[in-house]
Amino acid sequence: MIQKAIAIVTGSIFIAIGINFFVIPHHLLDGGIIGIGLIGKYAFGFIPGLTIIILSLPLYVIAYFYYKSYFYNGIHGLLVTSFFIDLLRPIAHYSSTPIFMSSLIGGLLIGIGVSILLTNNISTGGSDLLALILARLSSINVGVIILIFDSLVILTGSIVIPQTNILYSTVLVSMVGITTFLITGYFNPTKRSSY
């Protein structure tokens, strides 16, 4: 229980720093539900963490009825990650990292954070939850599934952010996907006994 709590807080802080210090200052996009939350911020001024919670709720309702362990293991990750994303928003004002380095470092931090959560059978939002379910039902690595979701969000976000930022967002998403693939592939959460 303590290990899981530490994993939730640690992974969430990695994600929140990556998002606020490296992604938001350059109007980059991550993928999945977080990316959709960022699209909402850039286009309409929505609060990203709150948007992530609202968008994730339908999948958590499904998980509650069909995958209760996913629901109970994921709801904490969703709430804590969203909380830290919104809590750490002010650090965006202190970022001076160039956009290319931001896409690499931000992607690495987010990938590490997501991997910490996933290897402890915790999800950060709807797309991670859906990826865990699909990985459970298939032999596809959860990192690959997340990479596919992320790519779809980037394509959608191309109507909101400048075209030059799409390339850097692609680098970011690729870094998240590669990091998640390597870490979760090593620990392979779909074979862990808690699910």
Image (spheres, grey):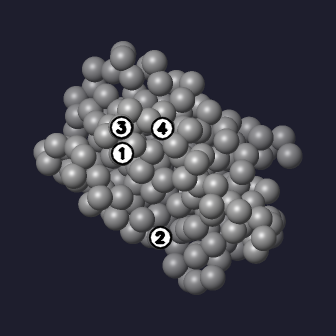
Pick whichever of labels 1 and 3 is earlier in the sequence: 1
Q: CA distance from mark 1 to mark 3?
A: 8 Å
Q: Contact (CB < 8 A) between labels 2 and 1?
A: no
Q: Is residue 194 left or right of residue 14?
A: right
Residue closer to the observer: 67 or 46:
46
Say above or below: 16 vs 60.
Answer: above
Where residue 134 sits in the image (x, y, percent)? 58, 76
Residue at x-position 57% and y-position 25%: 87
Q: Contact (CB < 8 A) between labels 4 and 3?
A: no
Q: CA distance from mark 4 to mark 3?
A: 11 Å
Amino acid type at circle 4 is Pro
Q: Which residue is mark 3?
A: 44
Residue at x-position 61% and y-position 40%: 81
| SS at badge 3 | helix
Where residue 9 sits in the image (x, y, percent)? 68, 36
Amino acid type at circle 1 is Ile
Where residue 5 sits in the image (x, y, percent)? 77, 41
Q: Which residue is mark 1?
A: 39
Pick whichever of labels 4 and 2 is earlier in the sequence: 4
Q: Which residue is mark 4?
A: 48
| SS at badge 1 | helix
Amino acid type at circle 2 is Ile
